[in-house]
Image (cartoon, rainbow, N blue to C red):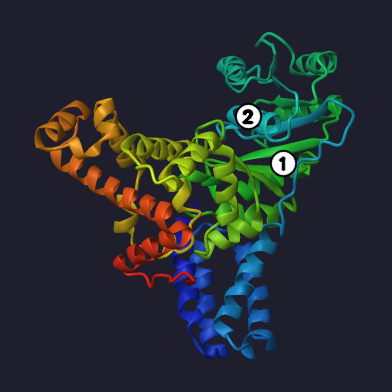
Amino acid sequence: MFESLSQRLSTTVQRLRGKGRLTEANIREALREVRIALLEADVALPVVQALIQRVQVKALGQEVLRSLTPGQALVKVVRDELTALMGTANTDLNLAAAPPAVVLMAGLHGVGKTTTVAKLARFLKERKKKKVMVVSCDVYRPAAIEQLRMLASQVDVLFHPSSGEQDPLAIAKSALDAAKKNFADVLLVDTAGRLHVDAEMMAEIKALHAALNPIETLFVVDSMTGQDAANTAKAFSEALPLTGVVLTKADGDARGGAALSVRYVTGRPIKFIGAGEKLEALEPFHPDRIAQRILGMGDVLSLVEQVEQSVDQEKQRKLAEKVMKGKRFDLNDMRDQLEQMVNMGGMASLMGKLPGISGLSEQVKSKVNDREVHRMIAMIGSMTKKERRHPDLLKGSRRARIARGSGTQPADVNKLLKQYQQMERMMSKLGSGGIKGLMRQMSGAMRGMGGGGFTPPR
């Protein structure tokens, strides 16, 4: 998400960052490019106008023009205003109610409500330690109830059965009683997709809201619909007392217009963002972190949280002990690291959170993808246990056999082993020289890629 917007904005602000002095003329020129970038990202026009006006007022003020580093001061202004536009800080779910706290999910057809219900159930169960029940009141789509039943089983939460012959209001009341009897902390209610212009369907969800009295009413919206997402959210917010928005399919949206528009247009906070089909692909929405990602500054905090949630801590502890004792990093260890990377959402997810990535060329970015990671795992899987423990055994005939077994070419195996050797050298530096040795190794690698490198303190 935000790839095209991030590339345009980071290029613009990078030019300003190095300037010793800013003038009204070059600020206005930069803001003109920012305006074009936002419009191309399908941000709603009133939002673009408001943002540019606010940035311009602050940028032409004494704070920026008299700063010792005016370029950096302007970047800070743009970042702060982007953050304010999206809501300043993360707004958590309000579950402060007598159990069960009811969360009602609303939205258009095909935006991913049912999957989002399962993702949210998983999030509440694993991160908030809540006992969760889910129910489907979608009696119009035959597969919806069965889909939610299967997803509830996968995330291991309570499921209240319903059928297409039942009345949605009766289902909701029955689920509420069941949630109380099962001592559930939270009841998540999935509803049918509906258009805001369909009076009958809107009357139905209003009746559901009145019967359940939910503490949270979340509008689920497809981020790929751009500024239309904000417009439909506004229409729903006029019919229902929405408490927040969930953006889905963010991984398929390179523009990011919905994220920048929906808070401003509706006045409702974006509480979660879904980026991927996996049931763990739902994260709290942090406006400050998203603003940094848009400007190419990365999102290291979210990356750290992602590592803590997804990485097998026991395996990492054992690897660290192994390396610090001077034992060799082998291909089994490399495969473990690659599999952990896949579990964290793949290369695209990781790269989007690293600082400076937006400045890389598309040619470089295209070479880093999950397909290559899976190929590498397949090649290591085609090796014998002995070969994985002793990579020095992998000579010509063995490499050819591994290539045949993994459906790759010998050149691919050679490339894998070269990457392994680089990782192995890096790990040995960590073992012999500690963190300083590793930093020097990484600095040399960065210089080789054209970066400035970093010299650790001695």
- Vertical placement of 426 versus 273: above or below? below
Question: Residue 170 in the image: x percent, y percent?
Answer: 79, 14
Numbered-mark total: 2
Name the residue carrying label 2: 193
> Residue 52, can we see it?
no
The type of residue carrying mark 2 is: Gly
Which numbered dot is residue 340? none
Query: Secondary structure beneath disc 2?
Result: loop
State the residue in front, 342 or 112: 342
Question: Residue 337 in the image: x percent, y percent?
Answer: 41, 40
Residue ranking furthest to the left: 397
Residue at 54% of width from left, 59% of height from top? 293
Q: Left or right: where does residue 263 sit relative to residue 68?
A: right
Q: Are marks 1 and 2 in contact (CB under 8 Å)?
A: no
The type of residue carrying mark 1 is: Phe
Name the residue carrying label 1: 236
Are there few (<14), some (14-19), or many (20+) residues within 10 Å of tag 1? many
Question: Closer to the N terminus: mark 1 or mark 2?
Answer: 2
- Vertical placement of 416 versus 55: above or below? above
Mark 1 vs mark 2, CA separation in Å: 12 Å
- Vertical placement of 195 versus 139: above or below? below
Question: Residue 98 in the image: x percent, y percent?
Answer: 90, 29
Q: Which quadrant of the figure has residue 88?
A: bottom right
Question: Residue 199 in the image: x percent, y percent?
Answer: 72, 32
Query: Secondary structure beneath disc 1?
Result: helix
State the residue in front, 118 or 347: 347
> Residue 71, can we see it?
yes
Residue at 47% of width from left, 49% of height from top? 350
Q: Left or right: where does residue 235 sit relative to residue 178?
A: left
- Vertical placement of 205 versus 236: above or below? above
